[in-house]
């Protein structure tokens, strides 16, 4: 009897352990939302690898979606929203806005402002493309979002992922996942979204406009620009200092010629590490139980709207501006799309569409002017929104 009783107790114990094991597996906790987000993550990875749409962003974000949507039993401290988990600790850099300024430091160290300095009026093209930010802001207000949430959503129109993360961390932390994924998604889809709009808004004659070659920019101008740019922009919008300060500092490291080691670290090690951490944690923040809401879908729709408006704004502004310029000074409106902050992909789109209509008309260097202006413009716009809405 004792043997039978012991055997029965052992079987009960094993059965209990087996049931508990099953309860802790992903199969027991999976929902259709998890499956949907895993499929989205696989699409992101496919687009990044097969189509090479911003692979440095889409591959980490897509894999982060897989990580974030593995179903688990609550309380194990493995989810990104569970305090004390590894993912949650890494996500602090996103939630508190630590990573974006470091990425801007690297962007500054990689950016050549020569195209903009050689033709300063291209700054206006970059500014005009920021129209998408304020259009999305007003659209979000109309859909019932609070003013601070609308401001964070609006910045998607600048096509600048780090700026979107920085602003949403200050204004709407609860919406950060949807805003960040939306911003990076549309940045990656620049080659898909913009060309049809550019063709729609321009005539065959406008697409073949040849612009004057950029003038040679002196070393003194390159060194002076980040210093004067910081003082001018930061005095107007002090709230944009975390981004603008690091952007111009990185550029000074690059252009001064005596801090090559620091410039190399900023443009390689620092920006690569931060891009990895942002990608994996932003992707993981799409955990279905917290991410899949009606508001998230609205944010994606507003992001698409803002991106379209930004492209319209840039191209139409060039067409309008050309009415006041002499023939030899006219700007090819195909570079209007590059006023968004997706560097250098938007400039490449300008060049590629231009080459479709004239195989010898290279627009890349011209398009880099409004493109880098868009980086500054989106940071300034973020500072303005932060000042009014924080």
Image: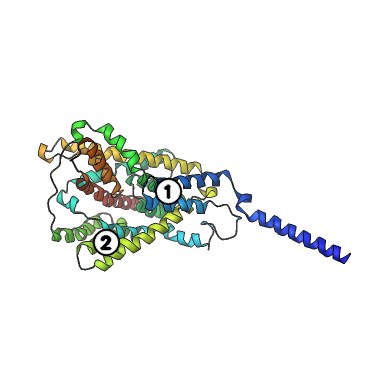
| Observer able to see residue 210 | yes
| Rendering quarter of residue 322 | top left
Q: Mark 1 or mark 2, which is nearer the start of the sequence?
A: 1
* Total numbered labels: 2
Question: Which element type, helix, strand or loop, lies under badge 1?
Answer: helix
Q: Can you give x and y, in whole percent of width and height, for residue 79 in the image? A: 54, 57
Q: Which mark is residue 250?
A: 2
Q: Which mark is residue 210?
A: none
In the rendered image of this protein, does residue 208 appear above or below residue 103? above
Identify the residue at image location x=31%, y=58%.
104
In the rendered image of this protein, does residue 138 appear above or below residue 200? below
Compared across the picture, whether 48 is left or right of 372 comes to: right
Residue position marked by numbered label 1 in the rendering: 181
Q: If the image is split into quadrants, where does the N terminus sit?
A: bottom right
| Rendering quarter of residue 35 | top right
Classify mark 1: residues with Cα within 10 Å, few (<14), some (14-19) or many (20+).
Answer: many
Q: Can you give x and y, in whole percent of width and height, for residue 146 in the image? A: 43, 45
Question: Which element type, helix, strand or loop, lies under badge 2?
Answer: helix
| Observer able to see residue 285 | no
Q: Can you give x and y, in whole percent of width and height, for residue 59 in the image? A: 42, 51
Identify the residue at image location x=47%, y=44%.
296
Residues under numbered marks 2 and 1 in contact, where contact means CB atoms less than 8 Å apart: no
């Amino acid at each position: 009897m004792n043997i039978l009783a012991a055997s029965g107790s052992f079987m009960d114990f094993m059965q209990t352990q087996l049931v508990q094991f099953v309860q802790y597996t992903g199969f027991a906790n999976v929902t259709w939302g998890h499956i949907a987000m895993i499929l989205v993550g696989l699409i992101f990875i496919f687009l990044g690898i097969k189509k090479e749409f911003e692979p440095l962003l889409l591959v980490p974000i897509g894999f982060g979606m897989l990580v974030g949507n593995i179903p688990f039993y609550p309380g194990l401290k493995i989810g990104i929203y569970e305090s004390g988990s590894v993912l949650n600790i890494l996500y602090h850099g996103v939630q508190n806005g630590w990573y974006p300024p470091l990425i801007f430091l690297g962007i500054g160290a990689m950016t050549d402002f020569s195209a903009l300095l050689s033709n300063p009026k291209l700054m206006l093209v970059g500014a005009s493309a920021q129209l998408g930010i304020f259009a999305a802001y007003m659209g979000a207000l109309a859909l019932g979002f609070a003013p601070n949430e609308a401001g964070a959503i609006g910045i998607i129109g600048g096509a600048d992922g780090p700026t979107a993360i920085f602003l949403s961390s200050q204004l709407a932390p609860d919406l950060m996942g949807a805003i960040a994924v939306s911003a990076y998604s549309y940045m990656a889809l620049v080659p898909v979204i913009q060309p049809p709009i550019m063709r729609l808004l321009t005539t065959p004659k406008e697409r073949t406009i040849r612009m004057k070659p950029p003038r040679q920019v002196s070393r003194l101008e390159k060194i002076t620009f980040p210093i004067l740019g910081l003082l001018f922009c930061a005095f107007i919008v002090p709230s944009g200092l975390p981004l603008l300060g690091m952007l111009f500092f990185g550029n000074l490291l690059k252009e001064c010629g005596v801090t090559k080691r620091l410039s190399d670290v900023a443009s390689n090690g620092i920006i690569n590490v931060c891009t990895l951490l942002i990608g994996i944690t932003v992707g993981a923040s799409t955990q279905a139980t917290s991410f899949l809401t009606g508001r998230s879908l609205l944010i994606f729709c507003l992001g698409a709207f803002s991106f379209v408006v930004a492209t319209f704004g840039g191209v139409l502004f060039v067409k309008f501006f050309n009415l006041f310029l002499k023939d030899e000074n006219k700007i090819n409106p195909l570079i209007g799309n590059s006023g968004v902050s997706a560097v250098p992909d938007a400039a490449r789109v300008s060049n590629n569409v231009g080459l479709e209509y004239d195989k010898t008309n290279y627009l890349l260097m011209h398009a880099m002017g409004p493109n880098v202006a868009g980086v500054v413009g989106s940071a300034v716009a973020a500072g303005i929104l932060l000042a009014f809405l924080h």
